[in-house]
Image (cartoon, rainbow, N blue to C red):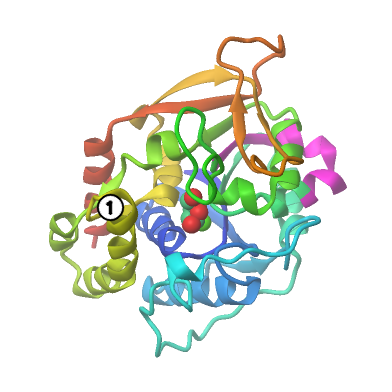
Amino acid sequence: MKKVILDVDTGIDDALGILLAVKSGQLDIQAITTVCGNVSLEQATLNTCKILDLLDRPDIPVYQGAEAPLIRKGLHEHHIHGEDGIGGALSKVIPPVSATEGFAPDIIIDTIMTHPGEVTLICTGPLTNLALALLKCPEMTDRLDQVIFMGGVIHGCGNITPVAEYNMYADPEAARIVFHAGFKQLVQVGLDVTRKALLTAEHIARLTDPAIRDYVAESTAAYTKRYEERNGVKACALHDPLAVGVALDSGLVETTLLYVDVETSSRLCDGQTVGDVQNRLNHSSNMDVCEQVNSEAFLELFIQVLNKE
Ligand code: BDR
Ligand code: CA
């Protein structure tokens, strides 16, 4: 089994990504680390523990990381993810587990250094925890098997500003550190592909476990409405679950090696990920950019995995 760490800001779709990762049975989840993003660090941690309780997996350790982006103020997305970050689902649940002692960036470093070449890091929030880990231990870049992150967009428009995707916009300085760290394999799962991974009411109706189906339906209801208002499609974009999907089956996406940088000092364009498609800057590529996705196969995988006993 592939050893992974999930770095999350649990949010509606992060939670669905955790469900997919845990239920797949194909990933050896070493830790789930939380970061300030969609909601506060504390709320992201609580939501993560609620999901692990729903899955009856209190054994997976959760560690808290950065309380704020590297230099900016935290920017939450309650208008998208609801006051609690998971659309009001599981509101009465008091999870029996809470975060384990330890700072997420240190846990990331320790896990990677203990299992050199074996760990894949899947980041579905702002990249603050990974950037802090890199600042403390730059040599970890060679020891990580792969980093898969949900964030940015190369060919389309943004979802928080006209040009920026939320995770990049929330902490562009952290993204910049990650982009230039020199990882063996850095995979960008951006809006180019995640906007095509759309969960509809018909998909949800096919979920067979009543507890999971009710959770997914409730947590995505308001999000789906807001997505429809903005995009004209009644669906929930599975941004973060697709990053997990790529870890489970890289054949779901087609990638292009590109040099990508992120804007950190612009009035209008902070957080924009700029892909040097025509190699005008003459830099070596630094990431695999997902450009195409087999959405049907991914949605099928998502449903099959969530339907596992
Ligand atoms: C990303 O931002 C958050 O709203 C989601 O959880 C996802 O990680 C999509 O832009
Ligand atoms: Ca997220």
Residue type for callout 1:
Val
Is label 1 in a helix, a strand or a loop?
Answer: helix
Q: Which residues are magenta?
A: 132-149
Image quadrant holding the C terminus, namely: bottom left
Taking the magenta stretch, the answer to whether it contains residue 190 is: no
Q: Is mark 1 within 8 Å of ligand 2?
A: no
The secondary structure that dominates the magenta segment is helix
Q: Which residue is mark 1?
A: 305
Q: Residue furthest right?
A: 136
**Is 254 placed above or below 152 here?**
above
Which residue does the image show at 31% across and 66% down from the upper left?
A: 220
Q: Is residue 173 left or right of residue 7?
A: right
Taking the magenta stretch, the answer to whether it contains residue 133 is: yes
Q: Can you give x and y, in whole percent of width and height, for residue 78 in the image?
A: 50, 71
Q: Is residue 278 left or right of residue 184?
A: left
Determine the image quadrant of residue 143: top right
Which residue does the image show at 73% across and 58% down from the upper left?
A: 69
Q: Can you give x and y, in whole percent of width and height, for residue 302 in the image?
A: 28, 49
Q: Residue furthest front?
A: 267
Q: Is residue 193 left or right of residue 170?
A: left
Determine the image quadrant of residue 164: top right
Q: Can you give x and y, in whole percent of width and height, for residue 175 in the image?
A: 69, 42
Residue 111 in sight from this viewpoint: no
* Label 1: how many Cα within 10 Å (few below 14, some 14–19, many 20+): some
Which residue does the image show at 86% across and 48% down from the upper left?
A: 136
Q: Can you give x and y, in whole percent of width and height, for residue 3 in the image?
A: 55, 46
**Is 41 placed above or below 118 here?**
below
